[in-house]
Amino acid sequence: MRTSTSMSGTSTATSGAVTTLAATSAALASIAALAVAATGTAFAGDVTATKAVPLVVYSAQGYDSAEATAFHKATGIPVELDDNSTGPLLTKIEAEKDNPKWGLLWVDGATAFASLDQQGLLLRGWEPSVSWNSLGKQAVPPDHSFVPTGLTMAATLVYNSKLVASPPTSWAALLTPKWDGEIGMNDPAVSGPTYPFVAGMMAHLGGVAAGEKYFTELASNGLHVYLTNGDTLAALETGIIKLALVQSSAGIGASIKTHGAVKVKFLAPVTALPSAIGIDSKAPKAEQQEAERFVGFVLSREGQKVMQSGDPTGDSLYWPVIEGVNALPALPKLSAVPAQYINPYTWGQREDAVNTWFTDNIVE
C-alpha cells in the first residue's frame, strides 16, 4: 500500500484515504488542446464554461497521483484520488453499489472490470478516439465497457541471482522439494495482479479443480502468501524466500533497483495482465464526461509520458497499447514472452468464489 499526498499541498492521507487534488470546483477556462493523442488529434475536445464537478478516481496504479495532477493542470478539472490496493477498492465499490461514490476505476486486471460490467456497474458504448496497437485491439471489450491502458504480466518468477544459480524452468518445478518453503506470492483477494495469475494457472491446467490441486500442492510445499508485490519482494530481499511470484513490472523494477542482481524469468505460460479504466454507470453525466476526458488524457502522448515516468521502477514498466508509444528500455520484447490470454468474462464471474477458496485453503 502507498501513501498519497495532496497535490494542493494542504494535506496528506494514508493509503485508502481520499486525496483532494483541487479543494474547490473551478470554472473551466478556455484551454487550447494541451496534449496530442497518439493519433495526432487534439486531446481535450471542446471546452465549455460548465462548472466542473470533482472527478472521483479509485486507483491502484503507482503513477495515478502524477497522472491526476497532470490532468488537473491541463484541464482545471478537480480530481479526488482514492489510492489503495485493488481488493479493498473493489470491496468499497461493492459496498457502495446502491449509492456509488466513485466516478472512475483504474486498476490492473480485466477480470475485475468484466465482473463489474456483468453487474451493470460500468458505462458501456464509449471508446476514446485513439489508434490502438494489436495489444490494445485485443483488450478492448465488445461492449466498450472499459478501456485498456497498458499491459504487464501476472506472476513472473523473480529471484536473487547471487543466491539462486539455477532457477526453476517450469511451473511444475515449483512443487519439488528443492523449493520447499522458499516461494512467496501475493494474496489474490488483496492484490489486483494476482487473481489473474491464479485464474491463468487454472485455465492453463484445465480448469478450476486442476488449479486448486496445483495451489494446494504449492501450499504443502511451504508457500508463503503476502499481501502485495512490495511485501513479497521484501521477503525476497531479506532472504525469507528465494523465489517470488509477482507482477512483471514489480519484478523488473526490483532488477533495476538492484542493478541486475534480482532477475526476472517468464515461465511458460505467463498470463497477460491488462490495466484498464472503467467509468461508473451511475455517476452524474457531468462526472462521466470528465471521466471520458481523463481517459483521453491518459492515452494521449502527454498522458503516456506521465504513465511512463510516474513510477519508473514499478507500474511504469508496461507494454503500451497505443500506436506510436514504445515500451521503456528495461522491458524485454513482447515477442520473447510466452504469454497467454484468458477470457476476462469467463474468469471475472469466478473471481469471488476462487478468492474465497484461496483464502480458506491457502492463506495461513
Image (cartoon, helix red, strand yellow):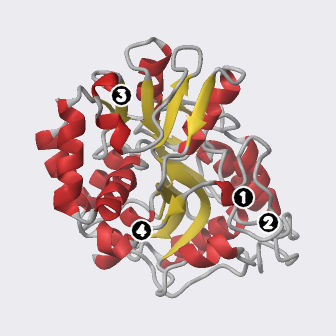
Label 1 with label 4: CB-CB less than 8 Å: no
First of labels 3, 2 by sequence position: 2
Q: Specify few, some or many for label 2: CA neighbours under 10 Å numbering under 14, 14-19, or 20 or more.
A: some
Which of the two residues, 92 or 358, is positioned nearer the viewer here?
358
- Residue 183 numbered mark, or none: 3
Instruction: Inspect the image, locate mark 4, and give the three-letter code of the amino acid beneath it.
Output: Ile
User: Where residue 195 sits in the image (x, y, percent)?
Assistant: 34, 52
User: Where residue 126 sits in the image (x, y, percent)?
Assistant: 56, 84
Which of the two residues, 238 or 62, is positioned nearer the viewer here?
238
Query: For the N terminus, which image quadrant?
Result: top left
Tell me the CA gap for discs 1 and 4: 39 Å
User: Where residue 199 sits in the image (x, y, percent)?
Assistant: 32, 58
Q: Which residue is mark 2?
A: 29
First of labels 3, 1 by sequence position: 1
Label 3 with label 2: CB-CB less than 8 Å: no
Between circles 2 and 4, the one closer to the viewer is 4
Label 2 with label 1: CB-CB less than 8 Å: yes
What's the residue at 80%, 62% (across, down)? 325
Query: Horizontally, is 328 left or right of 179 in the view?
Result: right
Q: Which residue is mark 1?
A: 76
Tell me the CA gap for discs 2 and 1: 7 Å
